[in-house]
Image (tube, grey):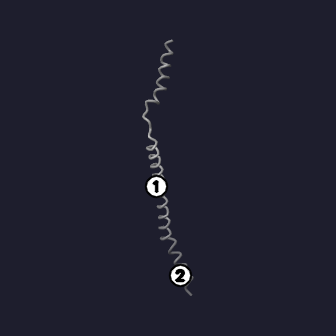
Amino acid sequence: MKKKWPFLYVIVLIKIFPACKQPVNIDEEILRYNQRLDSVAGARIDSAYKKIKDDCDTARLYRLPVLIDSLLKTSAP
């Protein structure tokens, strides 16, 4: 008989606990979710622009002189 009371007490607490939480505003949750998505998308866009810039710098430094030399050599008689 003594073991039944703590068990019932725990069950009552489990049923009451969800009712004690404050209700979550759906608009705030959507706003936080969109902000998280925007930050992830912004980071991806920034890394893509950095990769493009690095590729353009590499092309300007290494490939462009080779292309110009090949054009000058083929156009000369």
Quadrant housing the C terminus:
bottom right
User: Do the numbered discs 2 and 1 sit on residues whose CB atoms are within 8 Å?
Assistant: no
Q: Is residue 6 above or below residue 41?
A: above
Which residue is the extreme one toward the bottom? Answer: 77
Comparing 28 with 8, the one in front is 28
- Pointer 2 local density, CA inside 10 Å: few below 14, some 14–19, many at least 20: few
- Pointer 1 local density, CA inside 10 Å: few below 14, some 14–19, many at least 20: few
| Residue positioned 57% across, 82% down in the render | 74
Q: Amino acid at mark 1?
A: Gly
Q: How far is mark 2 from mark 1, CA to CA?
A: 43 Å
The mark lying in front, picked from 2 and 1, is: 1
- The residue indicated by pointer 1 is 42
Q: Amino acid at mark 2?
A: Leu
Residue 63 rendering spot, x and y as whole percentages: 52, 71
Residue 76 rendering spot, x and y as whole percentages: 55, 85
Which residue is the extreme one toward the top? Answer: 1
- The residue indicated by pointer 2 is 72
| Residue positioned 49% across, 64% down in the render | 52
* Disc nearer the start of the sequence (2/1): 1
Comparing 52 with 2, the one in front is 2
The secondary structure type at the circle numbered 1 is helix
Residue 68 rendering spot, x and y as whole percentages: 52, 77
The secondary structure type at the circle numbered 2 is helix
Q: Is residue 15 above or below residue 33?
A: above
Residue 22 rendering spot, x and y as whole percentages: 42, 34
| Residue positioned 48% across, 50% down in the render | 37
- Mark count: 2
Residue 33 marker: none
Q: Is residue 60 above or below residue 15?
A: below
